Amino acid sequence: MQIFVLALSRLVPLSLLISLTLVGSRYVHDLVLRTNPARARLAFAAVSLIGLLSIAPYAWRAGLIVTAQWATGTQRWKAADLMFTEYDSWNGRRSEDTLRMWAYARMNLNDWNGAIDVLALADAPSPQEMVLMGVCQYYAGSAAAEQTLRSIPDVTSTQLCVRDYLLGRIAQKRGDSARAFALYARSAAWEPNFFPSTYHGVRLRLASGDRVRAGAILDAFVRRFPALATDAEVGRLREAVRTGSVPPDKEFVIVSN
């Protein structure tokens, strides 16, 4: 449905432009017909050709963006990236949605640096685009990730759980377990069903020898989201809590648009 609406939104102005071209061609034809009937058809063809050549770039861009979104919707990431790249080369509008979808395609290809290049095209990036930039910088191994994530304000329509989770991962890798745990807790407070924060929160409690706190965190998560009780990762945490072992330091790869 979304692709249909997008195609229709591009088709309506395209039809209008074609209609205006035909009206203009007929007007010029009738105007020339009065003074030079032999050249009336030539005038009609010339104006039609000029009009269609003017419309062609718009029609091509419309086809590219519709195809790019279709490829994204069907998870054809390489094709989506190629279509978005071609669309941009034809001076396609760099709207926030377009840049985010283009970056999303590259993120699914694990092309983190390529996604960074796309997100950097935004003139005034939104907080959510900054989250995506921080995600890409983190997985690309860029030292700029922490500064980017720290600059994101607490605003709605922004994946703050991802921001705080990645800041927690950065703190944990630096050896600051206390700050990492606090950031995981804040991430879970923003989005309780964001499992990576729960996983690493439980893991840090187990690493510190606090099986009771680790079990309480896990039990609270399962009570709130019983459908995830049979998830393999939840089962792995349950076993770790039962035995007092420390689960692997798992790096969850977050891909979001």
Image: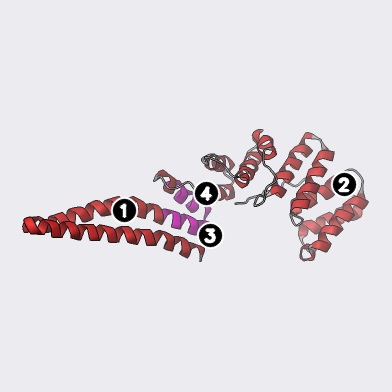
Q: Which residue is mark 1?
A: 55
For badge 2, the amino acid type reads Arg
Q: Residue at x 74, y 45 (%)?
A: 165
Q: Which residue matches tag 3?
A: 73
Queried whether the magenta region covers residue 84, the answer comes back as: yes
The residue singled out by tag 4 in the image is: 102
Magenta segment, which residues?
Answer: 64-86
Indicate left or right for 170 with 2 as reference. Answer: right
Helix, strand or loop for the magenta stretch, by majority: helix
Residue 257 image offset from top left, x and y in percent? 59, 51
What residue is pinned by disc 2?
Answer: 205
Count the marks: 4
Decide which of tag 4 and tag 2 comes sooner along the chain: 4
State which mark lies toward you, 4 or 1.
1
Q: Determine the secondary structure under disc 2.
A: helix
Rate crowding at label 1 as few (under 14), some (14 to 19) or many (20 or more) other CA atoms within 10 Å.
some
Is residue 207 shown above or below 7?
above
| Disc nearer the start of the sequence (4/1) | 1
Displayed quadrant of residue 39: bottom left
Question: Which amino acid lies under the numbered mark 4 shown in the image of this protein?
Answer: Trp
Q: Position of residue 173 (x, y in %)?
A: 76, 37
Q: CA distance from mark 2 to mark 3?
A: 40 Å
Whether 98 is among the magenta residues is no
* Element type at mark 3: helix
Q: Is residue 150 visible?
A: yes
Cα separation between marks 4 and 2: 39 Å
8 vs 49, left or right, is: right
